[in-house]
C-alpha cells in the first residue's frame, strides 16, 4: 500500500524566553512569532527590600518549513481514510493538526523490511525518520552504533523527551533500555497496543469444576502462593475423561510459554555479569530447575499434557484445544487476544502470571519481541525528526487508553486486569535471547524445542547449548 501524506495538527512547543536570545531568530528551525504569543510576568519580593522584577517570556511556534517526516511500519497508527472509522477520523485529525502547527508533512510508510535497517545504518542512506522495528533487528544495531540513543541530552535538547510518560508509554519504552540508554519508543494507547508478554490464560469453568475457582487462583497470586506445585496440581484436577470412554476430554495444560518459564525462578538463561558482558546462564541451578518444571512437570507431564499422548499436535492444534474449552491452561501473550484467539472462546477466561519457582521472590513476564520506534544514525535530520516524533507521541500515547483497551480485550475481568498491571507488567523483562535471528533460532527452536519434545534433559540441554549461546552473544554484542 502506498504511503499517504497527511496535514497535521498541532503543538505549541515552548521555545525559551527572554534570556535565550531566540526572539526574532530565523535559524535552523525557522522560529517565527506565534500568533497567540503570551506574556508571563512574575513578581519577586523579599523581606529585605521592596524590589520587584518582571520577567517576560515570549513563547514561539516552530516552523519546520515543509519538512517531510517519514514514519515507517506504523501498524495501527497507519491512517486509512477508506476505513472511515471513528478512530481513523480522530487519528487523521491528530496528524493534520501537528502538520499545520509545525509546518511539516507526515508520510506513513508501511512496508520497510526490517532487514534493510542494517544496510541503511552501514551505508548512511536514510530510510525514514523513525521506524518501528522488532528487537531482533534493533538490538544488533546498538552494538554497531547504528541507532541514536533517544534519551541523550542532544535528543532532549532537540525536543524529544523519551522518559516523559505523557509522551511515550514508559513500561515498554523503558524495557528498551540497554547500555544505559533508551533505544525504542512505545506509543500504546487507544490507537495502538503493544502486546504484553507471556502468562497463562485459564478456562474459568474448567478450573471451577476442578475445585479451583478463579477467585482462589487470583488470591494465590496476590498471596505469593501461585507457584510450580500449585499449577501442576490444579492442571491434574482439570484433566478428565468426562464420558468414561477411556479418552481424555479435557486436558490440564494445552501449551507452554515458549521458554518464558526459564525466567520464573529468580534469574534467567542469559544475564549480564559484573563487567557488563552478556553471558549464558544455563548452568545456574535455578535455571536448571525451571527447565525441569516446563520439561517434566508441564509440557512433558503424561497426566496433563496432550502432546505427550499425541506428539503430532502442532502449537496451533494445542491452542485450538484451549480456545474450544478442552484445556484448563494455555501459555499465551497479548498477541493471542483478539477475534481469532481468546475473544472467540465460548467460556470465560482468566489470566495469571507464569507461576514462580522456589527461588523466586516474585513473578516475571517475559516480552519476547519488543517492537518500538527507533531512529537510525543514517537519519541526519534527527533534530527535526525529534520535534515531530515528540508531538506524535504526546498526541497518541495514553496509559488510560491502553488500559481501557486491554480491559475490554480481557472481557472486563478486573482481576485479570489486576494480574497484568500489578503483578506482570511491573516485572517485565526483555527476552535478550531474541537479540538476533540466529540467536533466537538457536534458543527457541533448538534448545527449548529439544526440551519440550523430551529429547533433551535439563542438565544435558545446558551442557549442549551453553557454549553455542555464548558464541552468539559475543557475536551480536561484539564482546
Image (cartoon, grey):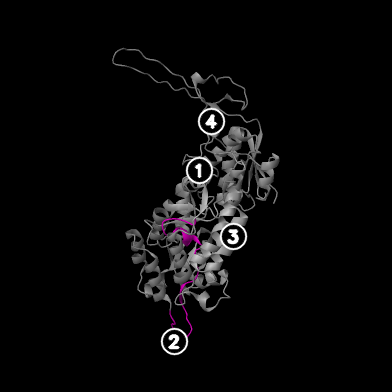
First-in-chain label (2 vs 1): 1
The alpha-carbon separation of the residues under discs 1 and 3 comes to 33 Å
Pinpoint residue 329: horizontal percent, then vertical percent: 45, 69
Residue interval drawn in magenta: 240-269
The alpha-carbon separation of the residues under discs 2 and 1 comes to 55 Å
Label 4 secondary element: helix
Rendered image: mark on residue 168: 1
Residue with the mark numbered 3: 442
Structural crowding at the residue carrying mark 3, measured as other residues with C-alpha within 10 Å and reported as few (<14), some (14–19) or many (≥20): some
First-in-chain label (3 vs 2): 2
Label 1 secondary element: loop
First-in-chain label (4 vs 1): 4
Pinpoint residue 7: horizontal percent, then vertical percent: 63, 39
The alpha-carbon separation of the residues under discs 4 and 2 comes to 71 Å
First-in-chain label (4 vs 2): 4
Residue with the mark numbered 4: 157
Structural crowding at the residue carrying mark 1, measured as other residues with C-alpha within 10 Å and reported as few (<14), some (14–19) or many (≥20): many
Amino acid at each position: 500500500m502506498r504511503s499517504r501524506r497527511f496535514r497535521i495538527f498541532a503543538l505549541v512547543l515552548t521555545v525559551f524566553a527572554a534570556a535565550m536570545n531566540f526572539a526574532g531568530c530565523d535559524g535552523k528551525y525557522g522560529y517565527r512569532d506565534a500568533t497567540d504569543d503570551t506574556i508571563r510576568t512574575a513578581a519577586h519580593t523579599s523581606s529585605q527590600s521592596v524590589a520587584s522584577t518582571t520577567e517576560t517570556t515570549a513563547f514561539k511556534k516552530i516552523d519546520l518549513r515543509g519538512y517531510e517526516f517519514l514514519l515507517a511500519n506504523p501498524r495501527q497508527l497507519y491512517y486509512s481514510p477508506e476505513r472511515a472509522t471513528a478512530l481513523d477520523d480522530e487519528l487523521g485529525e491528530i496528524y493534520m493538526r501537528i502538520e499545520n502547527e509545525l509546518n511539516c508533512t507526515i508520510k506513513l510508510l508501511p512496508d520497510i523490511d526490517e532487514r534493510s535497517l542494517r544496510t541503511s545504518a552501514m551505508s548512511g542512506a536514510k530510510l525514514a525518520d523513525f521506524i518501528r522495528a522488532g528487537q531482533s533487528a534493533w538490538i544488533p544495531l546498538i552494538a554497531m552504533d547504528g541507532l541514536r540513543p533517544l534519551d541523550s541530552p542532544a535528543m532532549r535538547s532537540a525536543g524529544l523527551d523519551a522518559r516523559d510518560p505523557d509522551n511515550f508509554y514508559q513500561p515498554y519504552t523503558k524495557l528498551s533500555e540497554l547500555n544505559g540508554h533508551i533505544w525504542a519508543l512505545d506509543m500504546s494507547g487507544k490507537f495502538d497496543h503493544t502486546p504484553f508478554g507471556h502468562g497463562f490464560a485459564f478456562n474459568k469453568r474448567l478450573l471451577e469444576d476442578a475445585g479451583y475457582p478463579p477467585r482462589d487462583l487470583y488470591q494465590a497470586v496476590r498471596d505469593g502462593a501461585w507457584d510450580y506445585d500449585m499449577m501442576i496440581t490444579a492442571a491434574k484436577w482439570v484433566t478428565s475423561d468426562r464420558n468414561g470412554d477411556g479418552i481424555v476430554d479435557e486436558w490440564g495444560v494445552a501449551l507452554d510459554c515458549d521458554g518464558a518459564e526459564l525466567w520464573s525462578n529468580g534469574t534467567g538463561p542469559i544475564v549480564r555479569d559484573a563487567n557488563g558482558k552478556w553471558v549464558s546462564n544455563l548452568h545456574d541451578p535455578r535455571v536448571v530447575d525451571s527447565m525441569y518444571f516446563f520439561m517434566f512437570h508441564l509440557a512433558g507431564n503424561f497426566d496433563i499434557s496432550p502432546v505427550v499422548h499425541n506428539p503430532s499436535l502442532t502449537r496451533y492444534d494445542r491452542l485450538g484445544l484451549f480456545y474450544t474449552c478442552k484445556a484448563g491452561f494455555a501459555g499465551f501473550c497479548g498477541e493471542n487476544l483478539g477475534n481469532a484467539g481468546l475473544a472467540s472462546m465460548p467460556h470465560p477466561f482468566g489470566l495469571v502470571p507464569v507461576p514462580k519457582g522456589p527461588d523466586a521472590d516474585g513473578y516475571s513476564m517475559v516480552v519476547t519481541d519488543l517492537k518500538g520506534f527507533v531512529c537510525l544514525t543514517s537519519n541526519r535530520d534527527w533534530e527535526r525528526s525529534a520535534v515531530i516524533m515528540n508531538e506524535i507521541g504526546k498526541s497518541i500515547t495514553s496509559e488510560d487508553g491502553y488500559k481501557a483497551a486491554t480491559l475490554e480485550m480481557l472481557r472486563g475481568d478486573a482481576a485479570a486486569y489486576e494480574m497484568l498491571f500489578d503483578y506482570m507488567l511491573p516485572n517485565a523483562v526483555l527476552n535478550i535471547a531474541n537479540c538476533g535471528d540466529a540467536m533466537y533460532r538457536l534458543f527457541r527452536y533448538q534448545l527449548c524445542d529439544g526440551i519440550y519434545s523430551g529429547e533433551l534433559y535439563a542438565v544435558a540441554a545446558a551442557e549442549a547449548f551453553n557454549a553455542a549461546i555464548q558464541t552468539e552473544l559475543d557475536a551480536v554484542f561484539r564482546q
